[in-house]
Amino acid sequence: KFPLSGAHRNTECASCHKSGHFADLQTDCYSCHQADFAKVTVPNHAAAQLSHDCMTCHTQTSWKPSTFNHSTTSFALVGAHVTADCASCHKNGQFKGTATDCYTCHQTDFAKVVNPNHVTAQLSHDCTTCHTTTSWKPSTFNHSTTAFALVGAHVTVDCASCHKNGQFKGTATDCYTCHQIDFTKSTSPNHVTSQLSHDCSTCHSSTAWKPSTFNHRTTAFALTGAHTTTICESCHKNGQFKGTPTDCYACHQTDFTKSGEPNHVTAQLSHDCLTCHSTIAWKPSTFNHSSTAFPLTGAHGTTQCASCHVNGKFKGTASDCYTCHKTDFATPVIPNHVTAQLSHDCTTCHSTTTWKPSTFDHKKTNFPLAGAHLTTDCASCHKNGLFKGTATDCYTCHQTKFAATTTPNHVTSQFSHDCTTCHTVNAWKPATFNHNTTAFPLTGAHTTTDCASCHKNGQFKGTATDCYSCHQTDFARPTNPNHVTAQLSHDCTTCHSTTAWKPSTFDHQKTTFKLVGAHMTTDCSSCHKNGQFTGLPTDCYSCHQTNYTNTLNPNHVTGAFSHDCTTCHSMTAWKPATFNHSTSAFPLVGAHVTVACASCHINGQFTGTPKDCWSCHQTKFNATTTPNHVTAQFSHDCTICHSMTAWKPSTFNHSTTAFPLTGAHTTTDCLFCHKNGQYKGTATDCYTCHTTDFNGVTNPNHVSGGFDHNCATCHTTTAWNPATFDHNKTNFKLTGAHLTTQCASCHVGGKYTGTSTVCYTCHTADYNNSTNPNHATAKYPTDCTTCHTTTAWKPSTFDHTPYFPIGSTAKHRPGRWNLCSDCHTNPADSKVFSCINCHEHDKASMDSKHSGRSGYSYDSNACYRCHPRGNS
């Protein structure tokens, strides 16, 4: 854990490993270099409480020269700090708690600056705001870091112009505060009477007060067209800017009233002038009819407005065709629109271009025209000029053709009135029928069979779809096999196809008994005797009972073998036969694989054969003497030590017990622990076997020391010696000087149990002998860790910060006081303190400074109550 490098490589081993001690040596620098640490005076390492980690400044090459990388601290050195003498900041050799803020060191620089006066201006104590680490001067201030970045003329304005009387905090950032005079004296327009916004940036820039501009686009009324050149007073009369109307009518009411074509007033036109006029000029004006609910198309685009808007009426003008074209609707006779009750929606047949020619799109009805219907005269269907309620089914028009058809006779056959079943809209003939749309699609020979063969006497409805109905004669005729006597299924598709009755096949794989092996070539009658096909058994034994009974090696009957012949036989042949012992509860492995069956299955007994080792190997179990299995009461489970390969050699895996063997135990003879051949109940604790070792130890004396009988606490299974003890596993971990302290120093008189873990028990003398401060008189806590470490009693430290940070200001840092008693005036009670001893102001002066302060009184407790951190 301690690789040698630098000067350590040439150091004598004995320099570190004193008295030949190699185990548990400290690897930190301070343990060996404590003397080097203590003798350094510039700076004094001990007084400065420098870190014991020597690597912070020193290397393993030599103690000197030494360097310290200030960048590893929270205050990296830059600028003039790099060349500053350490003592400049670390006064009196103090390194811990050195302030890292600028003001602490540069308070004098801060106080003597008069332009501007940093103190009266209450400038920030963060000097980096204006100064750099290179030097105090020159200094700069980046106004962009504030809420008011300087731009335009502000960049060259003297600071005092805005920061009057050296006031920097709370300086206003709005324009009006500085430019109130400019605002007040402006008369064109008069900013005051016009109640213009105090936000000067609305019209003015930071470059100069004049010229000024106003962007009307920032208002709710952006200027366009002629408005851009109109003088402001035209709209903002009498210098009024607030509440100026933004609608056209307010300014253009006169234009609206005097307009006569059309008369805007009588026509009740919208007051929104933009409907027809633009901001460029009142005339010319236009009206976009597309913005209404009636966009103009076709001939409407050139029609005079008065044609529709009669008597100058614009509101409520009808937008339907019929209102204007009622005469056009009533005039036609082919067809007569009135008697035919045609729709008043003229767009059905007419367009906005002209009344004629007109068209009608039959596709928009629920009867789109196709085929011969496209060239049929309208009157053929719409008789007597009737259009509404015209039938859309075929039969209504084609009833005559339906009744006249005799091949087949549609009426007597009760054919569907849906003519599309066989006919198309092109012509009545030729006609086709797609049998695939029925429940009996035609396949094979059925596709060429005459319809009358199945549909006898012109009967189509209710025609049977099963094979047997048509093929009953074919079914009754065969004798090999005889379908009737064999009670074969009437489902002819089992063996026959729609192509022809013969040849026929039967797929045995679709039954519950699929044919494999020798069954595939066996004649059907071998199994289906006397033409019996239904109710036949599917088990092997029913057919192979003779084979089963005649087999003697082994005798299947006396052996009570299973009737499931597939256990040993295949469907290829009765012989050869095999038995897979792995399918039983005793798979064969090792020597069992080559053992003759009769060795285990005595007298041809196969059922109830025992599966445990002892039943077969009882003789070997009883005959074994090393060790004697019977007297040792060994388990009858032979697999614990023996394998199925052979009885010998045998092994025992001690790891399967509650005592796995490790270390020297692995080579110890079994009888050393299992005396007199006793294996059951052997003790697993160390002490039982190692009592003599335990009692014989004198350094330390295990018996008088009341040591734990768990030898594993200090010893291993490798050997009794060497022994170690890990103190870190106790409730008192060793650190610092405790690591090198002799055990007897704490465990006095060889006593180890009940040893106190509190510091005071061992360090009572140190506690009582301390005079600065006197621990006993002051009744200090006996928890020594408050101030002391386990490294040494001295130097000691006390973290005063939680109670009162004595490093919080320059006045409270060490150097301003020497002894704790400077503040803690009662040596018998550290809780008693005095602020007034150091802050020796007269009561009248303090009373004056604290005038109006709630809870003030001239005593130390009151000081602490208001100044608990020592600052103002």
Image (spheres, rainbow, N blue to C red):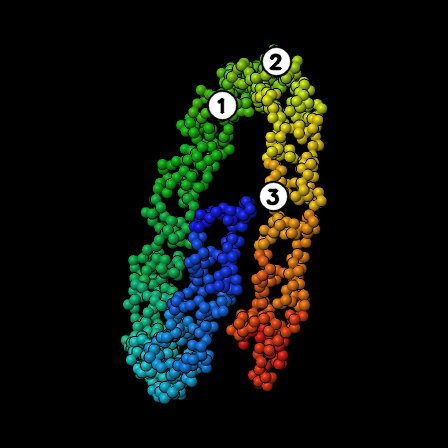
Horizontal arrangement in the rendering, residue 526 relative to residue 296 (left or right): right
Helix or strand or loop: what does disc 2 sit on?
Answer: loop
Which residue sits at x=51%, y=64%?
48
Which tag, 1 or 3, sits closer to the chain's start? 1
Q: In the rendered structure, are the residues bearing label 2 and label 3 in contact, judged by CB atoms less than 8 Å apart?
A: no
Residue placed at 54% from the left, 14% from the top? 575
What residue is disc 3 on? Answer: 724
Question: The disc labelled 1 sits on which kind of residue?
Answer: Asp
Q: Residue 871's image quarter?
A: bottom right
Location of mark 2 (residue): 554
Q: Which residue type does callout 2 highlight?
A: Pro
**Residue 222's mark?**
none
Identified by mark 3, the residue type is: Thr
In front: 103, or 650? 103
Name the image quarter holding the C terminus. bottom right
Residue bearing the label numbered 1: 507
Does 255 appear above or below 648? below
Tell me how far mark 2 sits from mark 1, CA to CA: 37 Å
